[in-house]
Image: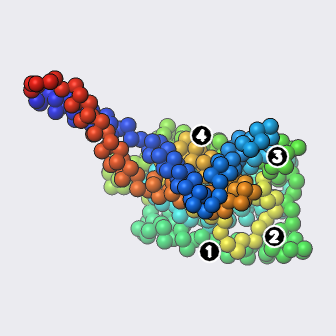
Amino acid sequence: MKSKLKVTTKRKDSGEKKHSHLTISLIAVAVGLIFAFLLTILTGRSPFDLLTALVRSMTGFNLQNLGSFNIMYVLNWFLNAVPIIMTGLSVAFAYRTGLFNIGGEGQIIAGSTAAAAVALLVKLPPIIHPIACILAAAAAGALWGFLPGFLKAYRGINEVVICIMMNYCGMYACAWFTKVFLPIDPNTNDRTIAIMESAELKQVFSNSTSQFNWGFIVALLAVVLFWFVIEKTTFGYSLRATGFNKEAARFAGMKVERNITMSMMISGALTGIAGALLILGIYRYGRIFTSFDNYGFDGISVALVGGSTGIGVLLAGMLFGLFKAASGNLQLFNIPKEISELIQAIIIYLVAIQYAIVLLLDKISERKIKKKEIEEKPEGGNV
């Protein structure tokens, strides 16, 4: 009887390990899509139109006319995913080190303004100019992440509160800076003149109507760098150790306060780079911000769904970029764009309550194990 209990326990443990974050995320995506299809039917619209809009955004093919193909839709998908991936990496980096960076909105505005300033005021050669703009944006984002990290490390103030205040400080301070120090377009008064051509991130396909540009290379490099620093370096190990247990890390000789401050600065730098990619590759002018674009908040969702890992954030960012790109296609089929937002909300909610999903999966696994044991039990006798 003891051996039987051991076997059962072993099977149960292996069953629990199977419920990875990837499995939970895939279940969440599937449930979100099912809800979206049901809601589409309830509103009197065709679920096939919803499927067509999603497939067209992902592949460029129109299911209602298979001979029709337009790569612009695929490029727009990638274009929408790039800034979300960057902000997702930012939130994930902070989370892996025990911090919660909710200040992405202020950091992305600071990065956008710094990139615009360098792109408008500094003359540099074509290849070096966008690199300088990106580095300036990273520095501005890091500066905007410094104060929450410093106050958290040396004064014990919750970084969430500071980050929320820094978002609004960033929006108003950068709006003032842009109006005072940067050349404003006299025709609109709500943006700067166009940035120098040497600072632009050029389109990958110049003959395409999509603005998809070389900024995606920056995002891919950031994913690789994120993975390498967090998983393969002693610096990343010390950051993660500080996040797991500050006192244990301090006892091991790690500089806890420095690690907390550096973590928020690196997180802010990643978000600042996202702001630069938006200015240099999409808008191509400096912006006077009067509201948030929500890229920072999208990054929180992406980090959550992606499990705060490099590859997970990349895949989650591509998923959320798809929904953002599909919102325009949905309207072509008379389907409210809020459907895509509903799918994202359901996915986030289900991943947030992942322990409930794990519990459900465990119950299903236990039933399968019991059923198998009953089938394997010899008839008319005890073991």
Q: Which residue is mark 2?
A: 191
Q: CA distance from mark 2 to mark 1?
A: 19 Å
Q: Position of residue 59 (x, y in %)?
A: 71, 41
Q: Which mark is residue 224?
A: 4
Q: CA distance from mark 4 to mark 2?
A: 34 Å
> Which is nearer the eye, 217 or 48?
48
Mark 1: few, some, or many residues within 10 Å (few <14, many ≥20)? some
Q: Which mark is residue 203?
A: 3
Residue 378 placement, left or right of 230: left
**At 57% across and 53% down in the image, what residue appears?**
37
> Which is nearer the eye, 254 or 111?
111
- Circles 1 and 3 in contact, beta carbons < 8 Å: no
Residue 233 placement, left or right of 192: left
Front: mark 2 or 1: 2
Task: Give the position of the C terminus as an image quadrant.
Answer: top left
Answer whether residue 284 is visible to the viewer in this image: yes
**At 81% across and 49% down in the image, what residue appears?**
210
Residue 178 placement, left or right of 17: right
* Mark sitting earlier along the chain (2/1): 1
